[in-house]
């Protein structure tokens, strides 16, 4: 939500990126991904398949996150073959 708040107003005018919609969608996402009766989350699915999961805090700046992803992918792909 912070990244969206940091966008210029003209970039989000006319979109669904407003506070009320963001909070509503985040609540629905959390309910769907933490529900005991819903389908497993993407993370749970990959865990069950024995696939390593990379964790990144959602408040991490984009470039820092991409750097982390790149390092993770490079390390995992060494062992994939």
Image (cartoon, rainbow, N blue to C red):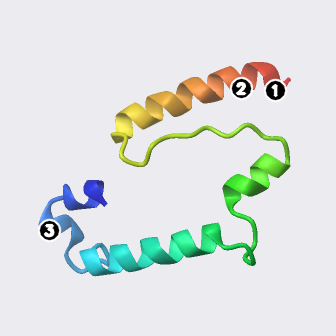
Q: Residue at x 76, y 50 (%)?
A: 46
Residue 67: image location, x then y, percent: 45, 28
The label number, if any, that marks residue 10 in the structure image: 3
Q: Residue at x 36, y 46 (%)?
A: 59
Tell which circle, 3 or 1, labels the residue nearer the N-terminal end. 3
At numbered mark 1, what does the secondary structure look like: helix, strand or loop?
helix
61 vs 14, nearest the viewer: 61
Asked whether the residues under the numbered discs 2 and 1 touch, taking CB atoms below 8 Å apart as contact, a structural biologist would say yes
Report which residue position mark 2 lands on: 76
Q: Which residue is mark 1?
A: 80
Q: Horizontal and vertical percent for residue 37?
A: 75, 78
Furthest residue toward front: 36
Looking at the rendered image, the disc whose residue lies closer to the viewer, 3 or 2, is 2
Determine the residue positioned at 72% across, 76% down.
38
Circle 2 SS class: helix
Q: Position of residue 26 (x, y in %)?
A: 44, 71
| 9 w.r.t. 50: above or below | below
Q: Is residue 57 above or below residue 26?
A: above
Left or right, 70 with respect to 34, comes to left
Sequence-first disc among 3 and 2:
3
Q: CA distance from mark 2 to mark 1?
A: 6 Å
Q: Residues within 10 Å of mark 3 (few under 14, many from 20)?
A: few
| Quarter of image, res 73 | top right
The reply to whether the C-beta atoms of the residues labelled 3 and 1 are less than 8 Å apart is no
- How many residues crowd around disc 1 within 10 Å: few (fewer than 14), some, or many (20 or more)? few
């Amino acid at each position: 939500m912070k990244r969206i708040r940091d966008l210029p107003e003209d970039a989000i005018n006319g979109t669904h990126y407003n506070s009320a919609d963001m909070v509503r969608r985040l609540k629905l996402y959390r309910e769907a991904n933490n529900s005991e009766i819903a389908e497993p989350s993407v993370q749970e699915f990959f865990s069950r398949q024995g696939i390593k999961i990379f964790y990144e805090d959602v408040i991490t700046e984009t470039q820092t996150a991409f750097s982390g992803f790149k390092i993770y992918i490079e390390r995992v792909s060494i062992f994939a073959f």
